[in-house]
Image (spheres, helix red, strand yellow):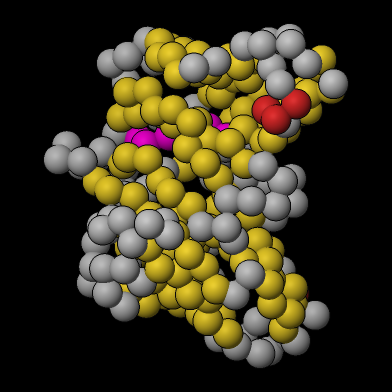
Amino acid sequence: SQQGEEDPQALSIQEGENATMNCSYKTSINNLQWYRQNSGRGLVHLILIRSNEREKHSGRLRVTLDTSKKSSSLLITASRAADTASYFCATDSLGGAQKLVFGQGTRLTINP
Amino acid sequence: NAGVTQTPKFQVLKTGQSMTLQCAQDMNHNSMYWYRQDPGMGLRLIYYSASEGTTDKGEVPNGYNVSRLNKREFSLRLESAAPSQTSVYFCASSTTSGGNYRETQYFGPGTRLLVL
């Protein structure tokens, strides 16, 4: 079963615009992570936010976490064509086994 | 550092054939994982190894076996391949913090498997 559910499933925007993707989860977590996957490649870690953090930044990325709503969002500002990829959230559940659980991903397309 | 390497990159099997997918990491990570990814879907965990000498089932273990050969290597074996196992397989590794939190996972490039 999927712990994280991303929304939307697909997003298409113009270069320079901001892109926002959301992730909802079901159980309490230790941390939540976001990964990017370019077509035909493995996943690359973007950012990790712990359960006691509310917001985190890395370059053009901004991640928020609302543990009361069991949700997170990933904002990519000033998007570029190179940001075209699928984005996945992954959760590390409290008391869970030694594993992350990945959502189904958001496919982001940046149009030049 | 090569990171996480996987072999082969691509494989075609006939139904009933067996094969082993190899994975190695050079980051001294304790934990290693095997996932499969089907079109339009996220990753589903097949098996994982929290530390050398241990392996545990994930979400979709049926039809697979694994071996944690040493700290660096974690192999995935299909004993009798079926068309339903056509997928892209990813290996990953990670550290585990002192608080037993699951930290960043590092992924290999994947193996594309086609079972006819």
* Residue shown at the point (43%, 49%) measured from the top left: B106
Q: Position of residue A77 (x, y in %)?
A: 62, 11
Left or right: where does residue B47 sit relative to residue A24?
A: left
Image quadrant in which you'd find residue A32: top left
Task: Tell me if residue B23 is in the magenta stretch.
Answer: no
Task: Please tell me whether residue B70 is drawn above or below residue B2 in the rendered image.
Answer: below
Residue B80 in view here: yes
**Count of picture labels:** 0
Q: Position of residue B115 (x, y in %)?
A: 74, 77
Indicate the quadrant containing the N terminus of chain B: top left, top right, bottom left or bottom right: bottom left
Taking the magenta stretch, the answer to whether it contains residue A91 is yes
What is the magenta segment's predominant secondary structure? Answer: strand
The quadrant in which the C terminus of chain B is found is bottom right
Check the image and report above or below for A28 versus B101. Answer: above
Residue ID at (48%, 52%): B107
Q: Is residue B99 above or below residue A99?
A: above
Q: Please identify the quarter of the rendering in which residue B104 is found.
A: top left
Spot occupied by residue B34 in the image (x, y as percentages of width and height): 48, 61
Q: Position of residue B55 (x, y in %)?
A: 32, 67
Residue with the most extreme left position: B98
Q: Residue A73: in sight, yes or no?
A: no
Q: In the current view of this chain or complex, which residue is farthest to the right?
A: A112
Left or right: residue A29 versus residue A70 is: left
Looking at the image, the residue that sits furthest to the front is: B1
| Viewer-closest of A46 and B97 | A46
Q: Magenta region: which residues? A: A88-93
Residue at position x 29%, y 34% in the image? A94
Front-most of A91 and A15?
Answer: A15
Horizontally, residue B73 falls left or right of residue A1, namely: left
Q: Is residue A30 left or right of residue B20?
A: left
What residue lies at 44% left-to-right and 14% top-to-bottom? A57
